[in-house]
Image (tube, grey):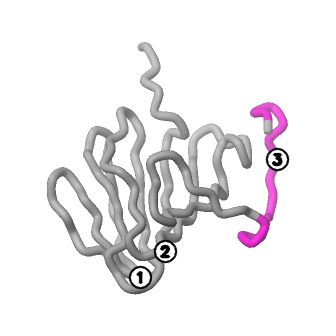
């Protein structure tokens, strides 16, 4: 979808396929609901993720992106800046740029959470 052809839309989540993005393992699946490739968004990447037990994303950080995770169901471990924290339903996490983080499903059922990322790319733009 090109940026100049953006339009408002209503879509049902069932229409969006589950994908396993790079550096996500063991059934760490996400539905890319609003992002440049699916909606032509310029400022927001919005996903729902479902991690099966033992699924995880590698530890990483972002140069300029901020993220918000909102746990909808299940429980797991959120690694934030060298410490592991149990996260479960209704917990939300804010991650500014530069913070090393990862999430894994250490629970007994699927870990379901929303992720909002802004800006959509982690490219550092020259000033």
What range is drawn magenta here?
A: 2-15
- Residue 123 pos. (x, y %): 47, 27
What residue is rendered at 36% in x and 39% in y?
Answer: 62
Measured in 3D between alpha carbons, the distance from the residue under mark 3 to the one under mark 1, in whole angstroms, is 34 Å
Q: Does dot 2 land on a helix, a strand or a loop?
A: strand
> Which residue is identified by label 3?
7
Circle nearer the viewer, 3 or 2:
2
Instruction: Of the two numbered discs 3 and 2 on the same chain, state the one appearing first in sequence.
Output: 3
For the residue pair 125 and 105, the one nearer the viewer reads as 105
Mark 1, other Cα within 10 Å: few <14 / some 14–19 / many ≥20:
many
Total labels drawn: 3
Measured in 3D between alpha carbons, the distance from the residue under mark 1 to the one under mark 2, in whole angstroms, is 6 Å
Residue 103, compared with residue 74, is above or below; it is above
For the residue pair 14 and 120, the one nearer the viewer reads as 14
Q: Please identify the quarter of the rendering in which residue 40 is found.
A: top right
Which mark identifies residue 112?
2
58 inside magenta stretch = no
Using residue 68 as the reference point, say whether residue 3 is left or right of it.
right
Q: Does dot 1 land on a helix, a strand or a loop?
A: loop
Q: Are marks 1 and 2 in contact (CB under 8 Å)?
A: yes
> Which residue is identified by label 1?
74
């Amino acid at each position: 979808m090109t940026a100049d052809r953006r339009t408002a839309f209503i879509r049902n989540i069932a229409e969006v396929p589950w994908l396993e993005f790079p550096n996500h393992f063991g059934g760490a699946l996400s539905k890319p609901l609003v992002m440049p490739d699916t909606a032509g968004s310029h400022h927001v990447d919005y996903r729902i993720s479902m991690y099966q037990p033992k699924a995880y994303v590698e530890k990483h950080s972002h140069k300029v992106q901020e993220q918000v995770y909102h746990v909808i169901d299940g429980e797991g471990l959120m690694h934030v800046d060298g410490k592991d924290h149990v996260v479960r339903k209704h917990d939300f996490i804010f991650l500014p740029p530069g913070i090393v983080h990862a999430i894994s499903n250490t629970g007994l059922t699927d870990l379901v959470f929303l992720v909002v990322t802004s800006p959509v790319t982690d490219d550092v733009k020259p000033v």
